Amino acid sequence: MPKKQERDLTDVLLSSQKKYKPSKKIIKEANVKDYEKTLKQAAKDPVKFWEEAASELSWFKPWEKVFDDSKKPFFKWFTGGKCNLAYNALDRHIETKTKKRTAILWEDEIGRTRKYTYQQLYWEVNKLVNALRGIGVKKGDRVAIYMPNIPEIATAMLACAKIGAMHSVVYAGFSSKALADRINDARAKVLFTADGSFRRGKIVDLKSITDDAIKETKSIKKVIVVKNNNAKIKFNKRLDVWYHDFIKGQPVEAKCAKMDAEDPAFVLYTSGTTSKPKGVVHVHGGYPVGVLRTIKWVFDLRGDEVFWCTADPGWITGHSYIIYGPLLAGITTLMYEGVPDIPKPDRIWKVVEKYKVNVLYTAPTLIRAMMRYGAEWPAKHKMASLRILGSVGEPINPEAWKWYYRYVGKNRCPIMDTWWQTETGMNMITPLPAASLKAGSACKPFPGIIADVVDKKGKQVPVGKGGYLVIRNQWPSMIRTIFNNPKRYIKTYWGQIKGVYFAGDVAFKDKDGYFWIQGRTDDVLKIAGHRIGTAEVESAFVSHKAVVEAAVIGVPDEVKGEVIKTFVILKEGFKPTDDLKIELKKHVRKTLGPVAVIKDIAFLDKLPKTRSGKIMRRVLKAKELGQELGDTSAMVN
Ligand code: WT7
């Protein structure tokens, strides 16, 4: 069992020596057979590489220019081209044999199942498109989606894309306040939700959370509620409508909006260094180009295969590799709503066996949780269908990698450790199945991507030395801007180190050019792979009447990777009791949602600060972990 997530250097160094070579069978089946040659070829002319990738999609009108950097850093791809994200993910398959194929397989924790062919999904989406148009949703509008992992989240996203309205999916583990903030920032007109979802044996009442959120917003004109449960809920006749009533009697054909390649397709909020999340904007043209090319090459998908990405559609992983990627590729995506260990610790392996999953894409935190239950649980299931495995969300420690390789992949399935971000839209640093692997390394940049590790001035650091992870070129599925905040876009990504995209991660390269990602450099935490800003958590603490000031750090955790520890200064008159700790934990959970797991709270009289008043979280962290304090010359108290 890994003692802590922070990388044990000897473990990493040993891992950087040993290579896992792909089998002849894997190479024979691979979409890319010669890994090194493909990398070299793409590197000669990345723009040409991406142009070639774009020609795999359908365009209503071809682009005039592949790449335009005349207004950098507001880069553009495929300008002059007309297309639609939903058309590429769905409509075009209706003209081919793919229409008969299963698009979505669904199962939830309590064992209910559903199945949609591409043809059925197309009809469902069209009904919704017509109904949404009927209430005035049009190109350029924003629609918020706060739903469990059920097929209707896919139809809602696709219907918005087909109309040209931007969807803003908010993860159902966020609180009503977080939902309201996101609705208000995007000024969303319509909200999709459900009357509940079943998780860990409990019912999550999403509708009452959205009811609370609506009170804090002015823009929502309609709430569309999926009946996923049968409980009685409060229904507001003026605002609420059942999903099934909403689409009743609607025609099964609908016109697809012809979008400019650079028109925004969706916004997805993610945490940064301030307490306000960033609305990352992706577009109709470039986004699917990157997503399709990566899902095909990284996961080697073809034909009638079943892909299971265990993320949630509320994160970018779900957008790109539960919904859009598999559908763009015309394969079958498995959606599972629930946790992996209910009723027993082998639920996840049971699902793999039952649906004959070919590719399983999951997160290190889940692998570590399954490791804890023991290898006897995956051993109960055949899982002979598995060909390729994937990992995403945080660095995977070599020990978890090896367990995954041995007990899940039975030593025959290569593991694709994919580094990427909400902002990048697609896998950026990742092996391909035909590459030689190292346990715990994300391997090399995807073809057409030029990544590097540099110092503050942008100079490449020597092999084995840690530095900032940057991307030197541009790529089609990259973030276009931050919704309503282009200045923050420039500053966050292009204003840190001159001329390159600043990822916010630290990494090093080994002598073979393999990347080893170490974690975030900024005040962003990764709790079970979920991204959350220290500033957001601190402001949630400070919104409690007893708190003057709070400082949040991430401390290593065996399973979750990181958990939150908070140092709190109380207002005069409040006593540092255990009851208050419990109350504060509850308050933060209510403010941010269950994603913010607070492990520990400590009451202090003072926080370490710089002269300019910035909290030195680094010092708190070093003390907490018993490490060297480093340079503390800037500290005043
Ligand atoms: C951050 C992005 C897009 C994937 C889901 C998370 C960390 C992601 C890896 C990996 C090491 C990783 C980075 C990155 N991260 N994948 N394979 N190895 N670190 O998306 O919420 O936008 O978070 O997740 O720190 O910057 P996100």
Image (cartoon, grey):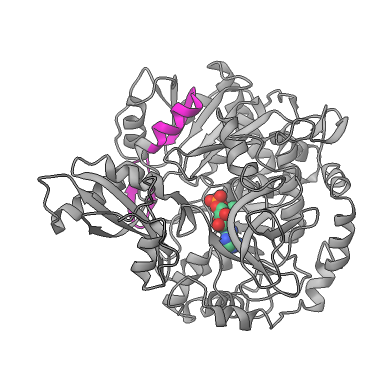
Nearer the observer, 303 or 508? 508
Point 27% across, 39% down: residue: 543
- Specify whether residue 147 is in view: yes
Residue 146 in the image, given as x and y percentages of width and height? 45, 37
Looking at the rendering, in which quadrant would you find the N terminus? bottom left
385 shown above or below 74: below
Point 35% across, 61% down: residue: 620
72 shown above or below 499: above
Point 86% across, 55% down: residue: 42
Residue 586 in the image, given as x and y percentages of width and height? 24, 49
- Specify whether residue 389 is in view: no
181 shown above or below 513: above
Magenta part of the chain: 178-205
Looking at the rendering, in which quadrant would you find the C terminus? bottom left
Residue 585 in the image, given as x and y percentages of width and height? 25, 52
Quadrant in the rendering for residue 478: top right
Q: Quadrant of ligand 1?
A: bottom right
Locate residue 301 relative to residue 10 in the image: left or right.
right
Does the stretch in magenta take in 5?
Answer: no
Nearer the observer, 301 or 596? 596
242 shown above or below 618: above
Residue 563 in the image, given as x and y percentages of width and height? 38, 61
Does the stretch in magenta take in 182?
Answer: yes
